[in-house]
Image (cartoon, rainbow, N blue to C red):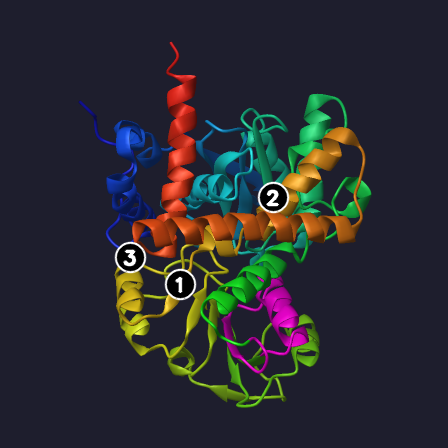
Amino acid sequence: MTGPSYVQATPGGPWATYLEQVDRVRPYLGPLERWVETLRRPKRALIVDIPIILDDGTVGHFEGYRVQHNLTRGPGKGGVRFHRDVSLEEVMALAAWMTIKNAAVNLPFGGAKGGVRVDPAAVSMRELEKITRRFTSEIGNIIGPNRDIPAPDVNTNAQIMAWMMDTYSMNAGGTITGVVTGKPLDLGGSVGRPKATGRGVFIIGQEAAKRQQVPLDDARVVLQGFGNVGSAAAELFDEHGARVIAVQDHTGTVFHENRLDIGKLQQHVIETGGVAGFEGGELIAPLDFWEIGCEFLVPAALEGVLDEPRARKIDARIVIEAANGPTTPEADDVLHDRGILVVPDVIANAGGVTVSYFEWVQDFSSFFWSEEEINARLDRILLVAFRHVCATAERLGISLRTAAFVVACSRVLAAREERGLYP
């Protein structure tokens, strides 16, 4: 007998999407299926109040979350996002996808995620530091280098990680660099980390193109999202002969039928905060973005953006999920029926967590690798994982996403069975 979960999934929401993805894997788990409910329930979810004194002297309150979905294979690992729309259900789903991602790439981590409901643009830098430090103190009893290791995510960066590391260290009475990853280099960060997720998107996209017999040279690339991940991926596609012809972000959609100048676009975004107003392309309607003909469509923003209606409109050969959970299950089915290959997020954007793993290892040993070593190790791990998922998909006659979940869920549930239940 199984009781109800403490959080009910909102229809069409990220947690509902994750649950449906797990349900699609059940027929392929064999004897391990008896443990599958483990994957449908977060191990731990912490909601915290974050009170701070604002710059005007008043008291502000912000809500924060840290969800540890599964710790069977190792300490929790997953980012912290600062966003005005962060919710418990969203963080639960993101933590669950981290469980799948870490297991699919075979990293010795479980899945976790955190978030604070705040618009970073609406607070000062001093207020942002206070929010970060108070949030870290509130979740400090469940994080740690052997328990749960946060990292940057949407609207967080190396500076946020530095504040988190310092706060945790001060409460622990000593410098503990391994409590977070994505830190500045001076504080135990790793070379190669800032562009690791974007690099992984490119490496996996390049391999997928070979399998689909899509030449990379002169291939058209369309990206949604031009932050750290989208920008780095665009740069690498451009350097290897592909043509980035459209980029969409929260400010607008810029298009050039031949090629956008990625270097100039990156500088424009640094100076203005978005792609709108870029003189090297024309501004087009946001909905037109989804109908641009291309070889690669790269959603690199937020979850749930590629729904069924958009899946029926897109004109792409390969979808590479640089964001977490950008495609709904209904859209997945449409894309599969249309013969459009979807490279799932749990493989496509695993470059960041892989180099975070390298950073964690380096912090423990206090011995640091060169960027060349980092990139070589990253490429090898991602390609081995992707090829294993492709082989599983071919053997079972299933999509790459379902195959990635089969690989990951089998590893997590096998570990659960071998560990047993205590007490």
Q: Is residue 407 left or right of residue 123?
A: left
Q: Is residue 7 left or right of residue 317?
A: left
Give the extent of the magenta segment.
216-242
Name the residue rendered at 26%, 40% in the picture.
26
Residue 171 location, x and y as percent?
A: 68, 25
Quarter of the picture containing the N terminus is top left
Q: Which residue is mark 2?
A: 151
Local crowd size for mark 3, using a 10 Å CA cut-off: few (<14), some (14–19), many (≥20): many
Disc number placed over residue 342 in the picture, else none = 1
Sequence-wise first label, 1 or 2? 2
Q: Which residue is mark 3?
A: 329
Q: Is residue 199 left or right of residue 328?
A: right
Of the two numbered discs 3 and 2 in the rendering, the one whose residue sits closer to the viewer: 3
Q: CA distance from mark 1 to mark 3?
A: 12 Å
Q: From what the image shows, is residue 195 above or below residue 176?
A: below
Residue 412 location, x and y as percent?
A: 42, 32
**In terms of image quadrants, where is residue 394?**
bottom left
Say which element carries label 2: strand
Residue 21 location, x and y as percent?
A: 31, 48
